[in-house]
Image (spheres, grey):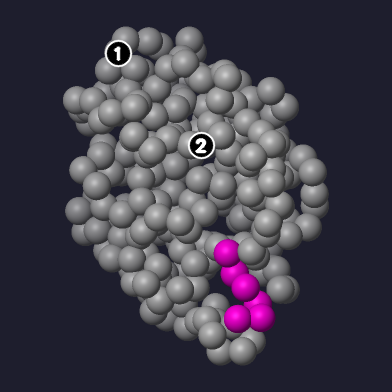
Amino acid sequence: MLKVILVVSGKGGTGKTSLTAGVGAALCQRDRRVLLIDGDCGLRNLDIALGMSDRVVYSFADVAGGAVPLADAMARHPEYQTLYLLTAPVALPALSERGMEQLAVQAEEAGFDYLLIDGPAGLPAELSFLAHIATQAVIVTSTDLACIRGAERCARKLEEEYCIQRIRMVLNHVRPRMILHGRSSNIDDAMDEAGLPLLGIVPEDEDIIACGNSGKCILSVKKDGAARAFRNIAQRIDGERVALMKL
C-alpha cells in the first residue's frame, strides 16, 4: 500500500528539502520504489538537491490537472533507478483535491511504495492540497526555539484542519557543542516544547551543501554524518527499530 508522507517545517531554512532528498534515496537503497514531489511552488529546489535540474520537465500540477499522465511526467534519478521526481510549478495553479487524489492513485498503480512530498515552509494555502493526500507527516526543525515553536504550530494545523494523525519530528542541523554548552535546546527539551515524537536527529553536515552544489547525493559520497542519519530515518519509516545516533 502506498504511503504518502508530507515533509514540512514551521519556517524556512530547516533543511527540509535536503532531508526529503536524502531519505528518499535511502529508501531506494532499501529496494523501495519512491516518488518525490516538490510541493514548494515558486521556490522549488528539490531538483537541485537531487542533481536533476536538467531532467525535470513536468510539475505535479500537470499530473493533478490531467494534462499529462504520471508515467510520462515523472523523471527518473540518474543513479537511483527506483527514485522518481515531479517538480513544483513556477506559480501556484488552480488545484483540486480530486486532482491530487488521482495523482496518488496513479502513483499506487505504478507500484510506488512511498510518495514523499517536500512541502512549503510555514502554512501557505497550497499546503491544504498536499495535506489532503498525506497519510502521515514529518516536521523538520532545528533546535532553535523559534523553529521548534513553528514546528508545534504546524503540527497542530495538520492535526486539526487536515486530520493527519501520525506526525513525527526530525531535529536537523543539530550542533552537539552548542547543546553541551547550553547555547541550544537539547533533544529532550525540543521534544517537550514541540510535543511531537522523534523520528530522527541529523547532525550539522557541511557536505550536504557541497553535494547539493555539485549535483551529487550525499549518500553516494559518504557513510557517516547526515548520510547515516538519513539511512536511519529511512529504516524507521520502513518500520524498523533503530537506535538514535550518538553525536
How far from the left and from the top, in percent, is residue 97? 22, 31
- Residue 184, compared with residue 69, is above or below; it is below
Q: Rate crowding at label 2 as few (under 14), some (14 to 19) or many (20 or more) other CA atoms within 10 Å.
A: many
- Residue 50, compared with residue 236, is above or below; it is above
Q: Disc 1 designates what residue? A: 66
Q: Nearer the viewer, residue 60 or 240?
A: 60
Q: Residue at x 50, y 46 (%)?
A: 17
How far from the left and from the top, in percent, is residue 11? 36, 59
State which tag comes first along the sequence, 2 or 1. 2
Q: Secondary structure at mark 1?
A: loop
Circle 2: residue type: Leu
Task: Give the magenta range.
Answer: 173-178
Gap between marks 2 and 1 measured at Cα? 23 Å
Quadrant in which residue 99 is drawn: top left
Q: Residue furthest bottom?
A: 182
Q: Residue at x 72, y 73 (%)?
A: 246
Q: Rate crowding at label 1 as few (under 14), some (14 to 19) or many (20 or more) other CA atoms within 10 Å.
A: some
How far from the left and from the top, in percent, is residue 49? 58, 38
Q: Secondary structure at mark 2?
A: helix
Q: Could you say which disc has been placed on residue 151 in the image? A: none
Q: Residue at x 46, y 77 (%)?
A: 190
Q: Nearer the viewer, residue 88 or 74?
A: 88
Q: Could you say which disc has been placed on residue 46 in the image? A: 2
Quadrant in which residue 52 is drawn: top right
Q: Is residue 79 left or right of residue 236?
A: right
Determine contact: label 2, label 1, CB under 8 Å: no
The mark total stands at: 2
Residue 227: in magenta span: no
- Residue 245, compared with residue 184, is above or below; it is above
Circle 1: residue type: Gly
